Amino acid sequence: MKRMIIQGGNRLSGEVTIGGAKNSTVALIPAAILADTPVEFDTVPDILDVHNLMIILESMNVKSSFTHGFLEIDPTQIIEAELPSKAIKSLRASYYFMGALLGRFHRATLTFPGGDNIGPRPIDQHLKAFKALGASVSENNGTVHLDAPNGLHGTRIFLDMVSVGATINTILASVRAEGTTVIENAAKEPEIIDLATFLNNMGAQIRGAGTDTIRINGVDTLQSMNTHTIIADRIESGTYLAMAAAVGDGVMVHNVIPEHLESFTSKMIEMGVDLQIDSDKIYVPRVKQLKAIHVKTMPFPGFATDLQQPLTPLMSLAEGDSTVVDTIYPKRVKHIPELQKMGMKIEAHDGMIVIKHTDQLHGAEVSAGEIRAGASLTIAGLMAEGTTVINNAGNILRGYDRIVWKLNRLGAKVSIEDDSSVKI
């Protein structure tokens, strides 16, 4: 168990560079086991989820090495093996091994994944797709068994709801299936395009990624020829933009893809933040006055659910009442009681989060219930007077590349320590 210690009241300035997208990385690593050659990734974020995925790879005799943002994975000696349940339960994206193993071996057995508890996130659409491709599915005591003894066969699959996870898992299962698979009502997130680009560069035939209809012609082999550079993390980008506006004296955010952030940056501009947007960087000047805004999360290209919590501390500086309606995860409210401990005027009722103007936050002992709630508390801690202690800081480290180093380079005073009082 780790906790983050923040000495508040230090204004931030300087430059920060965004890492590779977490939500791409956690799909690309399972996808690597579909290859018949070693694969290489660049700009890989140094986050706990990556290290846990490497533990899962090791259990299958898949060697991997990770240094300075460069990750090499060699699946050429892969074996079928029981996957470590502790690592599986540490992150929800471990369920991508279902599709990848099914695509590689035509069978898979996994315990139900863990990750952030932000309300119901069923995997029924994933299982529906696997069945349509020809796999039998059984569940027993929290374990899913998938088996396709006659192989996987392309088909037309309509997802009942737009789901990033189900879209990715269907791609992974069908990329080496026999025939053509068509995914309708597919998710359009940039991370799906990134995955398709990686697979296509190895010989896959995927068309339509980024639209609501994806067509996949199955291939017999996938062979990596080049290093795949992971796209910039739009959620990390948005988090630092909000942080810079809340407590910055001028911050340049490098390695961003502005097209992936338009729904977010438009809201910041609406608030009164004078963002200076370039092709791959955004400068955030010191903010003088902010106006209240209303946010409604939607599937991409709408406002990302993962960015509503990091934006919350900034909204508390605005004059008037700001509101958030999360249509993706209405139960994503773990940050609210923690922010209230710091003096923020925030509450949730009838499916809406209301953030009132707050003159000053104060340091407190709080807990990061999940990744993005932790990001919200980190920004609030930087804004607050005094010391803030964030327990369960491992959740923050799961999703933010070298966050302590980056914050301290900007002028913050942040540290991570083990909580020796917690008995594990």
Image (tube, grey):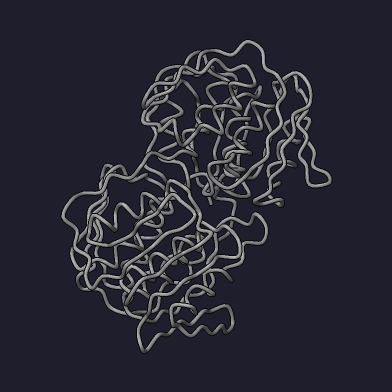
Q: Is residue 320 above or below residue 214?
A: above
> Residue placed farthest to the top in the image?
288
Q: Position of residue 371 (x, y in %)?
A: 56, 46
Is residue 3 visible in the rendered structure shown here? yes
Q: Is residue 400 above or below residue 59?
A: above
Q: Position of residue 378 (x, y in %)?
A: 58, 34
Q: Position of residue 76 (x, y in %)?
A: 19, 70
Is residue 87 visible in the rendered structure shown here? no
- Give 330 or 267, whichever is nearer the viewer: 267
Q: Residue at x 68, y 39 (%)?
A: 296
Q: Is residue 408 above or below residue 134?
A: above
> Residue placed farthest to the bottom in the image?
149
Q: Position of residue 136 (x, y in %)?
A: 48, 85
Q: Is residue 342 above or below residue 249?
A: below
- Give 362 or 369, whichever is nearer the viewer: 369
Q: Residue at x 34, y 60 (%)?
A: 54
Q: Residue at x 54, y 15 (%)?
A: 274
Image quadrant where one finds the C terminus: bottom right
Mark count? 0
